[in-house]
Image (cartoon, rainbow, N blue to C red):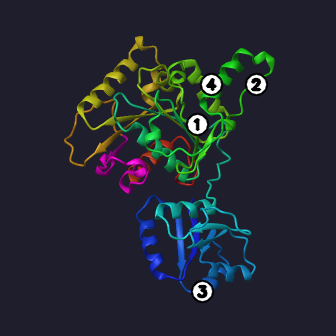
Amino acid sequence: MTARIVLAVRESQYIEPLLHYLHHSEYGEMLRITAFSRLDAFMEFMTGDELPDAVAGDPAFIEAWLVEGRSTVPWAVLSEGGELPNGRDLAGGRHIAKYQALPSLLEAILQLSDLKRVRTAALPKEATLLLGIVSASGGSGKTTVALNLAKQLGAVGLSVFYLNLESVDSSGFILRMPGSHVPGLERLLYELKAGGAENKGGRGQPKWTDYAFRHDSLRCDAFRPVENFKEMLQMSRQDTLDLLEGLAGAGSYDVVIVDTGAIEEERAQAVLNRCGVLLWVLKNDQASIRKTERWLDYIASPHSGMQPELVNRSRFVMNACTGAEDDRPLSAALRLDAVLPYIPSWGLQHYGELCLSSPQFIDGIQQLSRAIVEPELPGVFTGIPV
């Protein structure tokens, strides 16, 4: 779904770079902006029959429009003062800083429109897709792929939960964690164990939303990274399965993206067996390919103790490709579903959230999202349920 936005500002030179960035960024698929620099043209459009999803503009434009009494559309004033933070409530509207980084500006406008995909009634209540992100080798960029997937799926209106099960949560190296006073995963794990032991005492299942916080930059929910390293090391296979079952059965999320650590860990083994789709992230080298193939061979063997259909639930993406690779031989079981590009700027010392804003990488993630999510949740990208 695309949000229709009207932008009304007095400077025409403000509009051109914004629209140029919009058309060459991830927001091009989410926002359709009609821009005006003349008050009379803006007023004529706003008195027509086709109302937009939201309006953002200079105070003079917004005031003239509100006088006409057509304020049923969400609106925001673009302020040049900088004294108020984005999202500050006004009398019936919002405040957005006019001059700020373009991704932040467009994100604020997107939130103003409150873009949501209406979940298709045909989907059953427990149609939560558990998407496990795994890798047979370290340093494959697994967490970067997982975070970008969470952001892009949230952008199309899906309700997404990002669950990091690494012993050391590496998402903190990419994301700036917002302040939050919710109890978090450590407390939830305690409650799950206590609930299992004392179920007859009437404790029942925990309320999942009490332990999660909203990650606005990712457009998804998540747990705060676990501070007690020992807590993650002691998290068992059964603990992990209980956690996944709880998130899947909560009825709050369309997709739960599960970011794993080393594949031989108990937590990762639980993800392999429980998740409906497994996305294997490979590095663009022979060692990563061979390790992945060896794991697939082991999984398919009778003595592995793993579910025989696990390979059928597996999808594969090659990360950090330069476009000049030789044709690396792959086994029949390892057929790539997508290829993601190498981004040189990520080698800089403070790359941080650059990992979530590369147009090239985002384009590859969007193609990957369509390939692996649309078959599981029909209509997400096409808008037409099968």
Q: Is residue 268 left or right of residue 332?
A: right
Residue where numbered disc 2 is placed = 204
Query: Which comes before the other along the chain, label 3 or label 2?
Result: 3
Residue at 37% of width from left, 49% of height from top?
351
Q: Where in the figure is residue 68, as x and y percent of width and height?
A: 73, 83
Segment colored magenta: 337-361
Point out the image quarter for the N terminus. Answer: bottom right
C-alpha distance separating marks 4 and 2: 14 Å
Name the spot of residue 135 as percent of width and height, x first. 38, 30
Tag shown at residue 39: 3
The dot on residue 312 is: none
Mark earlier in primary sequence (4, 2)? 4
Which mark is first along the chain, 3 or 4? 3
Q: Which residue is mark 1?
A: 223
Q: Is residue 84 visible?
A: yes
Residue 53 can be seen in this image: no
Label 2 or label 1, whichever lies nearer to me, is 1
Tag 1's secondary structure? loop
Residue 189's tag is 4
Q: Secondary structure at mark 3?
A: helix
